Image: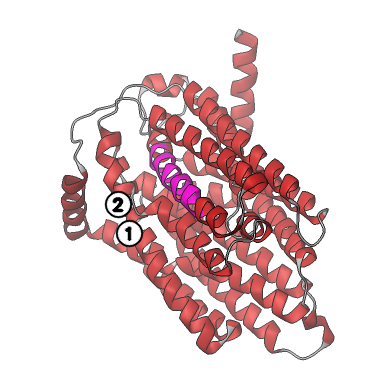
């Protein structure tokens, strides 16, 4: 056992670049002692979560599921908004509930188990669902999955802040992103083996593996060593809303961060449009989508550790740089569409832009997670995370609807120009944020 702990500490020091695994900041002594073990439990939990996310993707797998069971076409348009906003919007309402729990990992475990049950239900619907009733059941199950995802999300960040030291969290999330990129790569390679559309059994297998991924996530969360935290300050939903609004009025730095985070949605909103542009220009169907998934996995695997290390030094600069990067990628995608030549009529140039944008988006995600966790103190970290995610969920619905209308009116290429301007505004806003890693 002692040799195993020494080996684990050495591997932890190698991954984090530390010479002393007891270098701790912003966590108590007991959490410091358990930090190497908790680091790897967080890492494997992230692996299970990302595997499940990719194999139940609202942008890829679930649209195929609706097509296989013969659901109405309009239901496909509800998948991504439900998946994203459903996970973010309710978080403010559960922040007070989580605050009342001395050990928040059990909320994380419950969220993982509920997501596993929802994925298993989707697998059954792949086998037995039919028509509009089956489609409605898919959407209802996705609502439950998204709400459970939000429950896990807020608890995960709170447990992260209690068990992993400041200036180590970005590194952990970076390695998590790298492992997740490898999983995405494997999932994309497997999907490329399918023909025009996977059958019911293939979809059921994918969703069954997704359920197992969330089981792994919940098991790792349950084994994390978390010391009991303060439970004072737990509020009901209405009290949380009032406190959240007061925080937005009084904490100008928090308000400024949420403005920057909302503008940085440009990177997330641009991804499906770059993929769509590649499909419009090349006419590629599943083969093109498989290429995009593979380059996404490679890009995420390579980029995340770099962004993680940079975020531990200055997450503010990461947010600034990724805003500029998102703008450059959007302009590059639109520019390729305007260029003449047969080479622009293939998926490959757009796959290159997509890969660059995935790298940028990985930086956005790591930068804003690290900034938010480091900015918030232990006493109100859960509330800050929940409030910020609720605001972002509302903004995603609003900005997503506007970009959809603009895409219909302007076309995909000019929409990317609009999103490029949004990225520049995000960079300008992030450049004025205060440093929180000092």
Q: Is residue 14 magenta?
A: no
Percent x, y for residue 305? 61, 47
Q: CA gap, disc 2 to disc 1? A: 6 Å
Q: Is residue 370 above or below residue 397?
A: above
Residue for badge 2: 387
Q: Nearer the viewer, residue 13 or 326?
A: 326
Measuring 46% from the left and 58% from the top, which residue is drawn there?
A: 82
Percent x, y for residue 385? 34, 47
**Residue 319 bears which disc, if any?**
none
Helix, strand or loop under label 2: helix
In the image, taking residue 77 as reference, residue 161 lies left or right, namely left
Residue for badge 1: 391
- Stretch in magenta: 139-155
Asked whether the beta carbons under mark 2 and mark 1 sit within 8 Å of each other, the answer is yes
Determine the main secondary structure of the stretch shown in magenta: helix
Classify residue 427 by image quadrant: bottom left
Percent x, y for residue 328? 58, 75
Quadrant that contains the N terminus = top right
Classify residue 50 by image quadrant: top right
């Amino acid at each position: 056992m002692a040799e195993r702990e020494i080996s684990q500490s050495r591997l932890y020091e190698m991954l984090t670049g530390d010479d002393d695994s007891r270098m701790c900041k912003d966590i108590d002594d007991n959490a410091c002692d358990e930090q190497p073990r908790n680091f790897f439990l967080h890492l494997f939990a992230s692996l299970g979560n990302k595997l499940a996310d990719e194999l139940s993707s609202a942008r890829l797998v679930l649209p195929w599921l609706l097509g296989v069971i013969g659901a109405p076409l309009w239901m496909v348009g509800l998948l991504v908004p439900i998946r994203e906003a459903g996970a973010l919007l309710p978080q403010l309402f559960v922040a007070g509930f989580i605050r009342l729990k001395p050990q928040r990992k059990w909320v994380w475990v419950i969220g993982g188990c509920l997501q596993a049950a929802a994925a298993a239900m989707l697998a059954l619907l792949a086998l037995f669902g039919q028509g509009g009733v089956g489609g409605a059941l898919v959407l209802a199950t996705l609502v439950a999955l998204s709400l459970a995802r939000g429950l896990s999300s807020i608890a995960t960040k709170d447990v992260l802040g209690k068990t992993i030291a400041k200036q180590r969290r970005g590194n952990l999330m970076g390695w998590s992103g790298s492992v997740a990129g490898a999983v995405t790569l494997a999932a994309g390679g497997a999907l490329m083996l399918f023909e025009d559309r996977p059958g019911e059994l293939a979809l059921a297998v994918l969703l069954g593996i997704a359920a197992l991924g969330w089981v792994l996530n919940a098991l790792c969360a349950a084994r994390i060593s978390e010391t009991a935290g303060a439970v004072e300050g737990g509020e009901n939903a209405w009290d949380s809303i009032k406190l959240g609004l007061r925080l937005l009025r009084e904490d100008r730095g928090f308000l400024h961060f949420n403005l920057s985070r909302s503008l940085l949605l440009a990177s997330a909103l641009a991804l499906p449009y770059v993929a769509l542009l590649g499909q419009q220009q090349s006419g590629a169907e599943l083969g093109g989508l498989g290429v995009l998934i593979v380059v996404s996995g490679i890009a995420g695997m390579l980029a995340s550790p770099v962004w993680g290390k940079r975020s531990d030094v200055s997450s503010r600069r990461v947010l600034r740089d990724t805003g500029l990067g998102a703008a450059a990628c959007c302009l590059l995608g639109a520019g390729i569409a305007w260029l003449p030549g047969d080479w622009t009529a293939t998926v490959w140039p757009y796959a290159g832009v997509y890969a660059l944008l995935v790298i940028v988006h990985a930086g956005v995600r790591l930068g804003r997670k690290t900034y938010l966790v480091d900015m918030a103190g232990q006493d109100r970290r859960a509330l800050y995370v929940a409030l910020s995610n609720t605001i972002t969920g509302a903004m995603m619905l609003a900005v997503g609807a506007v970009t959809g209308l603009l895409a219909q009116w302007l076309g995909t290429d000019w929409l990317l120009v609009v999103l490029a301007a949004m990225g520049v505004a995000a960079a300008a806003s992030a450049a004025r944020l205060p440093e929180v890693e000092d």
